[in-house]
Each structure stands twice: as structure tokens, then as C-alpha cells.
Image (tube, rainbow, N blue to C red):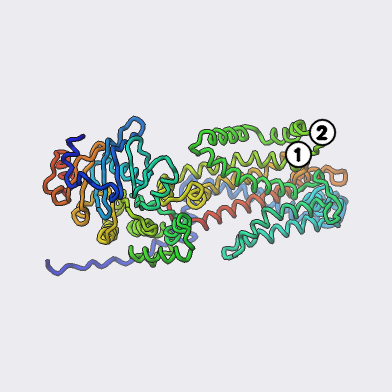
């Protein structure tokens, strides 16, 4: 062999100026074609006609002060946030706490406890996650109920039928989510089981609940369920709504998780089997962590839907955030200010749902280990 | 069938069954109507290194996958390390503890680090304390020459590195037999050698190996028996030099001429 040539790699050169930076971005995204340019102009025109008047009404000309409607009636050009301010406790915590502001510390304390318990679970390095989870899932529900409902510790009773507003929405949605996830996992595994009985039961359950509208389930839980129990058993209305929502939601969660399970390559099951892991070990350690990660968008999507669907409890006479806001705006003192009520409810719904959405995206990024099957 | 067996050289006829690590007797397997394995007889002594080749669909993967019950055979007996494979889950679990398997597509668990991949079975199947498991895993990661990748995720490694992790993961369980199902077929050409080197080292240490592969160089170097399968049958088996220089059947000759002509 002769002396070989040595290949010297060519150096990297920067891209043309016009394809990078703000100019490049605008060229690519706003003005890449005649059609795109036209759409950009139309969109900008629409934004200019809509946003300034809204800001004028909602912020600049808005009424914030006072305790009654006189100030709002004097200035009809702006939004009446006085109404939201005065009825804030009612919209957030329902009729009882709206009428008893001195008791509001109870739901606030319950919520603060919940947050305090939940935060450590999101801290990567926190060592006692197991105990905190037990506290959160087993102990907290009783403490929270005791605080909000009262009766124990000599606290005045706040009947569940008097619960409402954002608090009710939050309680119903969280109970639904917390119950639906484990039941959904079991149903999804059951639907893919080799055992015909387990499979049939799971499929029947999922198809039954999925084929029934939530509104019907709530109605049945409220009207039909008491028929099956002796007359003296007074089944709490909120509890019935919770059970109905949890059963309904678990069917949807199960289907979202089944999608994730089906996306798992067969090699993962075989790898786990070949190592001698038992069924539940391989599910818990290998399959579910990956399948749940794949299902996050679907699961969170159904949870967001659930959060908004809690408004349907109006059918059984419970007033969630939306219905409580509406009720407040129909009181004699504040008649006519329902736009403000709806906007405020919409804002709270949006904050919660967008929060869930962002959290799920962050979770997906965190769990991404750079592997594509 | 019997004529084939008569030609099967290198197989001591009066083998003492107790000294065999794997014994397959008249094993049959169907996928629906498709007859995938036809009356397979196979005896493997401890320390044997068997290379199995053959065209795709010939049943070679199916055969070795029956040995750890990833596939269920419908007729015949399979005895691994004295344990008969039946529907009994306990037997299956016991066999799987003794048999390591390396797959074509690695089948590493992408949500776990390399270290966690290796310690998983030690911790959950062998019930070993985490610290001991990590020490053992490190030993095998050093053996496959990637201890420095222990904290990475499989998705961050090259194909060759992933396959070496997969080998280390199987070795951690200290298996009596290693099954290799086309371990280099999914690799880029530049990475085949690093995996084969690890396998050769393993063979030199006396591991019992059954290896489905078309790496004929590897077969010549380490195998003490090369087997050709076609249509769900073991057509021919022999010592490597005999097998390659003097194949007995036209089907074997045709196959060898096709894979060796490049």
C-alpha cells in the first residue's frame, strides 16, 4: 500500500442571513406565500378590531369599587367587576360559605393542606414520597371532608347540598380523576387479558359507561339509586355525583390507557418475560410506565373534559362554578351582569384546564428518554 | 425424518440425559395452520456452542424461543436443566431464571437507565439487595466494556452499545444457557464486530450458547456445532469445518452458496 491520503473535513459555514433570526422566522411563518401573506393581514385586522374595545370594556372603563350595583349602573360602558368582588366567596365556595364568610378559612385551610401535601410529590429528590402519598390519598380525604363539612371538632355543619362553586367543581373533578386512574388501568389491562371472563367483564363495563351520556348517569345516580336502597338510607347527593363521575370517567381513562398498551412493541413484553418477571411485575415495572407515558395526552384530554363536564351536576341540583356564577348573576341585586359572571367562570376554568395541559406537556418532556420504538 | 437423524453427525446416540442442559424431543409447533417446527430433536450438553442458520421462516427463531417458552410448543417434550416445560407457570419461571436471551432488537427497557435495566431482574426475580445488584451489574457492564454508560438511557446509546447492554443484562442473572436470536441483524455494519467480540469472549469462557445468526465467521470461530434448518426441520448439523467444506444436502449447499458468495 502507498502512503494514504488523509481526508480533512470541511469546516461548517453559517447559514444565509435571510433564513435565520426574526426576519427568517417572519418569512417562514407569516409571508411564505401570497395566501399566507393575505391570511396574516386578515388576522392582524381582526385582532385590531376586537382586542382594543375588549380591553377598554374589561379593564380601562371597568368598575372595581363599591359594594353594590349603583356604581355599575352609573357607568354602563365598562365591566362590573364589583359584582364578582362582592359575590366572590359564593362563586368560589358555594352558598354556605358565601353566607358565612367567617367560616371560609375551613375550605381555604383544606386546600392549603392539599397543596402542601402535593408539592413534595413533585420534588424529585424528596425521600418520603410513599408516606406523603398515603397521607394524601388515605388521610387527607377525611381531614378535608371534616374541615369543609364540619360537625367534627365542633365545627358548624356545611351541608354538602350547600357546597358549590369552584370548590365543588374542584372536589368532583379531583375525586373523579383520582378514582378513575387506578380503575382505568385495571380495566385497560383486563381488556387485553388472556382470560375470557376478565376480558368480557372489562369490555362490557367500558362499553356500558362509554355508551351512556354523563348527564344520564348523574340523573340515574340521583333518581334511580335511592330506589335500590331502603328509604332510611339517605345517600348524599354529592357522594352520588362523585360515584357516577368516577365510574364514567374510569371507562374513558381505560380506553386512553389501552391505546398506550397497544402501542407497546411486543419485544418489551418478551424482554420482561425472558428475564423471569411475573405478570404484575412486568406490568408495573416495564409496561405501564411506558404505556402511561404514551397515553398522557389522551388521559389528560379526558381529565380536562371531565373538569368542564362537572357543570352537568346542575341536572341534580348541585351548583358548580359555572352554575353558581350564573345563579349569582340572576340574583335581584345583580341582575343584568351575567357577562361578567360567565367571563369570570370561563377564566377560572381556563386557568385550571390550561394548567393541566401545561403540566402534561412538562411531564411528557420529563419522561422522554430519547427513545423511539 | 429418520433418515435425517441418521445423518445427524456429531450427536452421541446414547447420551446420558442427566448431563444434558437442553433436551428437545419430537417437538412440534404450529402457528394456526402453519407447521413451524416439525419433530425437532435437539440435545445440548453444557458448554456447547451451537450456531443455527437457515432461510427466514425456517423455524430457527421459533425453536430457540420455545426453549424459554416465549413460544409454546404443542407436541413433544422440552427439558431445560432438568425442568420440563409445561403450562406450569412455576416451571416456566424456573427455566427463565436459568436461560438468558438476547434479541434482534435488543428489547432494552427505554424508560430505565442501563444500570436499572441490568439490576431489574436481580432485584425483583432474585430478590437481591439493590446495592449488591448494582455491584454485580457493574461487573458485567465492565465485561461488555461499557461501564461508563451505566447512568445513560438506552436511547442515548448506539445500536452496538445497546446490544452489549442487553448481553450484560442477561449475564447478570448468571444463566446456564444463553440464547441469541439474530443478535447482529439489526446493527449497522460498523457495530457488528463489537457485539461479536463480546460473544466470542463469552464462548471462550465456556458459556453454553445457542445462536441464530448468519455471521458465518463467528460460526467458524466459536461454534462446535453448526445447524441448518429449513421448513421447520433440522436438515443438517455438523462440526463447523465439516459443515462449511462438505455440506451433505443440496439445500444446505444452495443456502451456503448464497450467503457466502459476497
Task: Report crowding for label 2: few under 14, some 14 to 19, many 20 or more residues within 10 A (C-alpha).
Answer: few
Q: In which quarter of the image is residue A239?
A: top right
Query: In this rendering, would A298 be left or right of B102?
Result: right
Q: Position of residue A211 (x, y in %)?
A: 61, 32
Q: Where is residue B25 in the image (x, y as percent from the top left)?
A: 29, 40
- Total of numbered circles in the picture? 2
Badge 2 or badge 1: first in the primary sequence: 2
The outermost residue toward the bottom is A3
Q: Residue A117 carries which label?
A: none
Residues A326 and A241: in front is: A241
Chain of the residue on which disc 2 is drawn? A
- For the point 50% across and 36% down, the residue is A195
Give the quadrant of the N terminus of chain B: top left
Instruction: Kindly tell me whether residue B80 is visible in this rendering.
Output: yes
Q: Mark 1 — residue?
A: A314
Chain of the residue on which disc 1 is drawn? A
Q: Mark 2 — residue?
A: A231
Query: In this rendering, would B241 be left or right of A32?
Result: left
- For the point 16% across and 40% down, the residue is B7
Q: Position of residue A82 (x, y in %)?
A: 82, 53
Instruction: Kindly tell me whether residue B185 is visible in this rendering.
Output: no
| Disc 2, SS | loop
Query: In this rendering, would B160 be left or right of B125?
Result: left
| Disc 1, SS | helix
- For the point 87% across and 46% down, the residue is A333
Task: Report crowding for label 1: few under 14, some 14 to 19, many 20 or more residues within 10 A (C-alpha).
Answer: some
Residues A207 and A92: in front is: A207
Q: In this view, does A233 lie above or below A77?
A: above
Amino acid at each position: 500500500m502507498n502512503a494514504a491520503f488523509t481526508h480533512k473535513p470541511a469546516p461548517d459555514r453559517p447559514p444565509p442571513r435571510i433564513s435565520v433570526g426574526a426576519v427568517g422566522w417572519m418569512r417562514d411563518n407569516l409571508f411564505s406565500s401570497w395566501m399566507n401573506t393575505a391570511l396574516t393581514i386578515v388576522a392582524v385586522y381582526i385582532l385590531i378590531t376586537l382586542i382594543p374595545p375588549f380591553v377598554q370594556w374589561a379593564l380601562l372603563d371597568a368598575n372595581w369599587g363599591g359594594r353594590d350595583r349603583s356604581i355599575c349602573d352609573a357607568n354602563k360602558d365598562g365591566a362590573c367587576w364589583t359584582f364578582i368582588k362582592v359575590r366572590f366567596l359564593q362563586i368560589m365556595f358555594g352558598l354556605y360559605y358565601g353566607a358565612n364568610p367567617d367560616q371560609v378559612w375551613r375550605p381555604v385551610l383544606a386546600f392549603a393542606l392539599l397543596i402542601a401535601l402535593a408539592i413534595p410529590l413533585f420534588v424529585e429528590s424528596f425521600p418520603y414520597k410513599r408516606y406523603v402519598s398515603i397521607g394524601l390519598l388515605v388521610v387527607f380525604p377525611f381531614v378535608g371532608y371534616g374541615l369543609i363539612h364540619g360537625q367534627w371538632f365542633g365545627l358548624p355543619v356545611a351541608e354538602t347540598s350547600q357546597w358549590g362553586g369552584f370548590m365543588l367543581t374542584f372536589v368532583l373533578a379531583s375525586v373523579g380523576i383520582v378514582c378513575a386512574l387506578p380503575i382505568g388501568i385495571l380495566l385497560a389491562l383486563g381488556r387485553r387479558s388472556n382470560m375470557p371472563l376478565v376480558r368480557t367483564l372489562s369490555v362490557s363495563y367500558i362499553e356500558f359507561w362509554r355508551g351512556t351520556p354523563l348527564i344520564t348517569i348523574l340523573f340515574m345516580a340521583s333518581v334511580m339509586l335511592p330506589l335500590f336502597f331502603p328509604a332510611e338510607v339517605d345517600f348524599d347527593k354529592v357522594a352520588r355525583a362523585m360515584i357516577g363521575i368516577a365510574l364514567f370517567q374510569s371507562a374513558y381513562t381505560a380506553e386512553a390507557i389501552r391505546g398506550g398498551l397497544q402501542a407497546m412493541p411486543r419485544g418489551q413484553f418478551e424482554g420482561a418475560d425472558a428475564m423471569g418477571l411475573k405478570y404484575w411485575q412486568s406490568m408495573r415495572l416495564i409496561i405501564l410506565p411506558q404505556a402511561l407515558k404514551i397515553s398522557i395526552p389522551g388521559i389528560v384530554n379526558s381529565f380536562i373534559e371531565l373538569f368542564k363536564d362537572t357543570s352537568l351536576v346542575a341536572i341534580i341540583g348541585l351548583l358548580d362554578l359555572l352554575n353558581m356564577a350564573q345563579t349569582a348573576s340572576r340574583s335581584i341585586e345583580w341582575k343584568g351582569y351575567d357577562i361578567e359572571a360567565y367571563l369570570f367562570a370561563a377564566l377560572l376554568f381556563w386557568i385550571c384546564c390550561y394548567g393541566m395541559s401545561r403540566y402534561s406537556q412538562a411531564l411528557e418532556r420529563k419522561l422522554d428518554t430519547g427513545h423511539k420504538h | 425424518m429418520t433418515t435425517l437423524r441418521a445423518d445427524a453427525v456429531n450427536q452421541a446416540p446414547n447420551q446420558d440425559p442427566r448431563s444434558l442442559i437442553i433436551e428437545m424431543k419430537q417437538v412440534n409447533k404450529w402457528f394456526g395452520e402453519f407447521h413451524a417446527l416439525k419433530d425437532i430433536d435437539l440435545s445440548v450438553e453444557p458448554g456447547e456452542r451451537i450456531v443455527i442458520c437457515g432461510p427466514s421462516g425456517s423455524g430457527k427463531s421459533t425453536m430457540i424461543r420455545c426453549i424459554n417458552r416465549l413460544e409454546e410448543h404443542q407436541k413433544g417434550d422440552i427439558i431445560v436443566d432438568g425442568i420440563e416445560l409445561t403450562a406450569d407457570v412455576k416451571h416456566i419461571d424456573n427455566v427463565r431464571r436459568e436461560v438468558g436471551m438476547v434479541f434482534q432488537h435488543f428489547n432494552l427497557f427505554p424508560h430505565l437507565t442501563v444500570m436499572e435495566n441490568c439490576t431489574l431482574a436481580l432485584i425483583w426475580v432474585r430478590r437481591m439487595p439493590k446495592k449488591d445488584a448494582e455491584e454485580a451489574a457493574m461487573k458485567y457492564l465492565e465485561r461488555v466494556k461499557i461501564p461508563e454508560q451505566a447512568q445513560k438511557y438506552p436511547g442515548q446509546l448506539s445500536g452496538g452499545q445497546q446490544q452489549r447492554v442487553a448481553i450484560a443484562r442477561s449475564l447478570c442473572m448468571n444463566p446456564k444457557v444463553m440464547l441469541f436470536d439474530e443478535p447482529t441483524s439489526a446493527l449497522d455494519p460498523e457495530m457488528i464486530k463489537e457485539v461479536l467480540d463480546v460473544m466470542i469472549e463469552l464462548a471462550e469462557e465456556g458459556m453454553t450458547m445457542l445462536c441464530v445468526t448468519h455471521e458465518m465467521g463467528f460460526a467458524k470461530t466459536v461454534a462446535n456445532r453448526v445447524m441448518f434448518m429449513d421448513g421447520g426441520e433440522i436438515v443438517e448439523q455438523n462440526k463447523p469445518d465439516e459443515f462449511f467444506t462438505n455440506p451433505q444436502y443440496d439445500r444446505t449447499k444452495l443456502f451456503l452458496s448464497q450467503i457466502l458468495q459476497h
